[in-house]
Amino acid sequence: MKSPLRIEKTASSALVFTAFGLLAVSIAPCLAAPDVNAATTAETVESSNQGFSASTDLATAGYTTESTSTAIPVEETSKVSTSAELSLITQEAEATPATLPAISPKIAPLTAKAESQPTTSDAADLSLTNTPIVAANNGQSLETTSASVEKTQTDVRSLATPTKTTTLDSVQAQALPSENASDQTLPLADPLEMGDPEAAEADPMGQVTNISQLRDVQPTDWAYEALRSLVERYGCIAGYPDGTFRGNRALSRYEFAAGVNSCLQQIEKLIAASTADFTTKEDLATLRRLVDEFGPEIATLRSRVDNLEGRTAFLEANQFSTTTKLFGQAVFGVQGRNDNDFELSNLRFEDQNTNINVISNVQLSLFTQFSPRSLLLTGLQAGAGNTGPRTFNDQIFLGYEGDTGNDVVLSDLTYRQLIGNNFAFIVGPEGVNPVNVFRGANRVESAGQGPLSRFAQRNPIINTGGRGGIGFDWQLGTRLSLQAVYSASRPADSFRGGIFGGNDGETAAGAQLVVSPTNNIDVALQYVNSYSPFGRLNTGVGDDIVDFGIFSGSGRSPISTNAFGASLEWRITPRVTFGGWGGYTTSDVKVGSGTVETVNWMAYLNFPDLFGQGNLGGIYVGQPPKITSSDLPTGRNYPDIISKGGLGEEGGQPSSTTHVEAFYRLRVTDNITITPGVIVLFNPLHNDDNDTITIGSIRTTFTF
């Protein structure tokens, strides 16, 4: 039995060497870890799928519930879309990509996905059904990575702290052994334990460089990390010749002194090596001379910094608004088409609008955020120039045309509110229609950043609708969403129009169901019911006038139209997208009897990031709206009068127009893109007697 005195003066080897570790930490903390790289940050690269949201034209703007930016919507512009960006009130770009992609005139998802802008990438993986009506935030922040800092602290902590796998029993074992425990664990006849120098020399301890050389030390041992640090970091721990450490045996005062001395010597070597390049007095003197020499320059820089701080404070105190942000888009296009002839009512005409001209269109949007869940969007537009009138048919119109004679007009005035996490509504006297409420399946839909022609923007049946009204976007599930809208063309006119149309007002009510069966496929089904007292569909493309009775003495020809559409987009790879749509309308006249039917279709290929990040290539082939059947009373059937030169007998168009378009958007800077392209129309006006039309265009878009 060992005496109490002997027990008090002995401790397990593992416990003592843990104390060595703590001592090493206190002496040389600066050696515990490598230098921290303060420059370590996360960087993001914009891709062409994130940028252009299906709901607005200004693809680069964004707005968050807590932060800033938003895209700018305009009546005739398209949406900018990335599946996650579709939002009406507060898409969260910080979640963005997705990409979400930008708040737009479209009611897009409230919950962020993260385009986007049109730009390829992660946004492509987010489905259009992931988020409801809100503004997108494209802002990005750089954050210093914490991983490097944590790494620098790990080794220091490991010298003094057991690993996380420490159990209750091992924690209790850290205490000095009791008298009974000493009896059981300390051998009575061990000469090293008794401090016999001769015995120690007879059984010398061998130096080890790796903890794995000690075969009786296991990772589950409570002092494992401390021993590993002393062995592998400081190299001051020795083992027995048989490859054991014997951590449970008692330690003599001689062994303790030898161990401490070995560790202190090793620490001194490390400190000497690490301070070899420290600054000397001569270095400090040189630095002082440089400071004196460049004193005037340093003072100038200090003055400039003070001036900048003062100017910043002034701007903050006199800013336009703390709640309103301004975003804009300016489009300049140069275009022209070949000389051509066409027939109307068996009369031959020459196209008089073939000269090369310039079209401009500027849109400004003010986003006022009242709370993280609501905002007011005010849009202004001014434009000049057009491709010239094309009698009774709008097949040649370009997407960025918006001729106001350079007068500034109100293009959007809507309030958008998020209710709960999955439902949002939009209401306003201007800018509420299917174009701005429905989520667009084509994620590059945009008058400033997408296809050049108006027809290639979206299914024409979505263009039907008015100016003011109410709509909503409801996220029914992870891959399912529903949008609906009611709009009137003259909501402010109490005499000729009003909210419900009146005598001369046009109205439209419609819904769209969006389904994303996979992350790469979006399917949208549309239905719109509209009324027009002027015998037109209001698609703005192709056969828009369907009842020639509008040219009768009364100037009225009321019709009611049911329009059905389906759109598909399949992102085959991040750089190849296939899509298309089909549309069908059937219109019943209100004076007399009869029905007119039209059909349109489009197939396209988009190539995001083609030859460079942010670029976009596109090929579109389709048929603009065409009257396939018309059985109105004689004298009112459009195809027979215009295309065949008849008296207005029943029947459809004699042939079909084929629209072929190719373009390439080049991203010059983050805020400037140039898009050259060509459009070819075979059998214009759905009449094979007309000459083929070729249109060339170069569009330049500035976003700010």
Image (cartoon, rainbow, N blue to C red):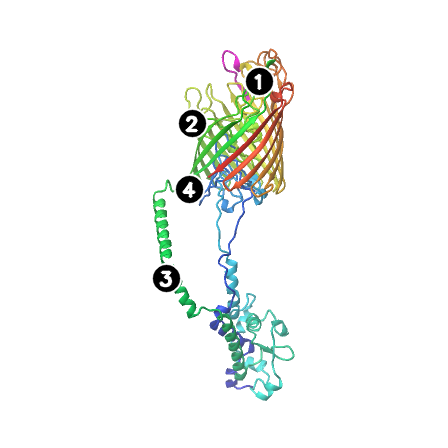
What is the spatial separation of the Cα atoms under label 3 and label 2, in whole angstroms? Answer: 61 Å
- SS assignment at label 4: strand
User: Which circle, 1 or 4, is nearer the viewer?
Assistant: 1
Q: Earlier in the sequence, mark 2 or mark 4?
A: 4
Q: Earlier in the sequence, mark 3 or mark 4?
A: 3
For marks 1 and 2, the one nearer the N-term is: 1
At which x and y percent is residue 384?
A: 47, 27
Residue 453 seen by the camera:
yes
Q: Is residue 533 above or below residue 250?
A: above
Circle nearer the viewer, 3 or 2: 3
Q: Secondary structure at mark 1?
A: strand
Mark toward the viewer: 1 or 3:
3
Q: What is the magenta segment's predominant secondary structure?
A: loop
Comes first in the chain, label 3 or label 2 = 3
Disc 1: CA contacts within 10 A as few (<14), some (14-19) or many (>=20): few
Rendered residue at 50%/82% (across/down)? 8
For the residue marked with disc 3, what is the amino acid? Asp
- Per the rendering, the mark at residue 371 is 4
Q: Which residue is mark 3?
A: 292
Which residue does the numbered mark 1 point to in the structure image? 350
Q: Mark 1 belongs to which amino acid?
A: Glu
Residue at numbered disc 2: 407
Q: Amino acid at mark 4?
A: Ser
Category of crowding for the residue at label 3, using alpha-carbon neighbours closer than 10 angstroms: few (below 14), some (14–19), many (at least 20): few
Q: CA distance from mark 1 to mark 4?
A: 57 Å
Q: Quadrant of the N terminus?
A: bottom right
Amino acid found under the numbered disc labelled 2:
Asp
**Numbered range of the magenta stretch:** 550-560
Cα separation between marks 1 and 2: 31 Å
User: Is 128 in front, or is 186?
Assistant: 128
Q: Nearer the viewer, mark 1 or mark 2?
A: 1
Secondary structure category for the residue under label 3:
helix
